[in-house]
Amino acid sequence: MGEEEWLACRGPIESGWLTSGPQVQAFEQLFAELHQVPHAIAVTSATTALHLACVALGVGPGDEVIVPAFTWVSTANVVLYCGARPVFADIDPVTFNLNPEDVKKRLSPRTKAIMAVHLFGLCADMDALREVAGSVPIIEDAACAAGASYKGRMAGGLGVVGCFSFHPRKSVTTGEGGMCTTSDSELAERIRSLRNHGASISEEQRHKGPRPYILPEFNILGYNYRMTDLQAAVGLVQLKKMHSFIQERKRWAEYYFRELSEVPWLRLPHVPEDYGHGWQSYVTTVLPDQAPMPRNDLMEYLQQRGISTRPGTHAVHMLAYYREKLGLQPEDYPGARFANDHSMAIPLHNRMTAEDFEYIVHTLRNITA
């Protein structure tokens, strides 16, 4: 964030158009162009994007949606919002993404959708997932994956709906915010209506039409998930920097690969051929049989030396709410449990200096028991 983002807010403030309007439309158009999809619909967060995707696809009571056991909790939460049941599938602890073979075991006649999370900016193995999914629609949880690609195709255009986040941890941000993407025109119109209480036309269409005093028709139950023009104005500035942001992160990710490859107890991220990583995070694995100390002790050691780390994310099936609601045990999903206990994100963002990266590498290479 900088002066450009600050100045961008001036337009909506001076125009008086603060809610969803012309800036949101411009933001959607640019996002769609960058991700090679015909439709992009801006919303308040990736969570609300995922919720709208599920509602638009008709997910409801009695249905099941397959979600990774290792992901941010909102991936599973939105299924419950619809009255459906999240069915967890295990992950590959090397890529941190869904294991297609385990997904295959979890399919049932009640499966309404599969949520493929592109965790930390690495796309899921979409070809393998499509093969096991058959006619079951795949929702991309692309919260971390703005600018990421899979075999030459951009994230957001790989499933029936893509859902992105603009939280400050992401590579581009609007403070809070999200986006749905799709190639399905009918689905796009349904999502646009759902985000605006189910209104038949948008607020901008109504106010700029010949009779702005006539309220729209409401034919479906919707939600207030609209992005503001203030957020979109900031997002437009950020989107124009997206490729340079990701290229800078990629350059420093490659530096980590070079400099940390000889640390025997640290497994570095895996990027398969033909994948374009979005580098939202650089998530390593602390190998328990070789590490000089347990992962949590290592994170405390680094914190004391000014290096902030975090677990990659959490195993949702191990969280108290889901553990108790669905009667799950930690060992039910061994890949997710391993990632929960041993993943470690090390700093990677666009405000870091060369000295920061050098200090992190020096510290990690010189840790001893």
Image (cartoon, helix red, strand yellow):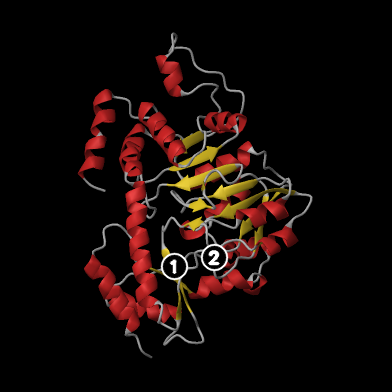
Q: Is residue 306 at least partly visible in the picture?
A: no
Which residue is depicted at the point 33% across and 64% down?
Answer: 252
Cα–Cα span, label 2 and label 1: 9 Å
Q: Which residue is painted at 26% across and 73% down in the image?
A: 358
Residue 353 falls in image quadrant: bottom left
- x, y percentage for residue 206? 45, 17
* Residue 146 shown left or right of residue 359 in the figure: right
Q: Does 321 sit above or below residue 13?
A: below
Pointer 1 residue: 283
Counting other residues with Cα less than 10 Å from the Cα at mark 1, is it few (<14), some (14-19), or many (20 or more)?
A: many
**Which residue occupies 54% across, 44% down?**
162
- The mark found on residue 333 in the picture is none
* Residue 63 x %, y %: 72, 47
Identify which residue is drawn at 61% across, 29% down.
186
Q: Secondary structure at mark 2?
A: loop
In the rendered image, the residue lying farthest to the bottom is 369
Q: Earlier in the sequence, mark 2 or mark 1?
A: 2
- Measured along the vertical axis of the image, is residue 138 above or below residue 12? below
Across and down, in percent, residue 143 comes to 48, 51
> Is residue 360 at all visible to an observer of this figure?
yes
Please name the residue that numbered disc 2 is placed on. Answer: 96
Q: Quadrant of the C terminus?
A: bottom left
Labels 2 and 1 touching (C-beta < 8 A): yes
Left or right relative to 181: residue 83: right
**Could you tell me residue 188's position as x and y percent?**
56, 32
Going by the image, does 56 lie left or right of 135?
left
Query: Helix, strand or loop at disc 1?
Result: strand
Q: What kind of residue is marked 2? A: Phe
- CA neighbours of label 2 inside 10 A, class few (<14), some (14 to 19), many (20+): many
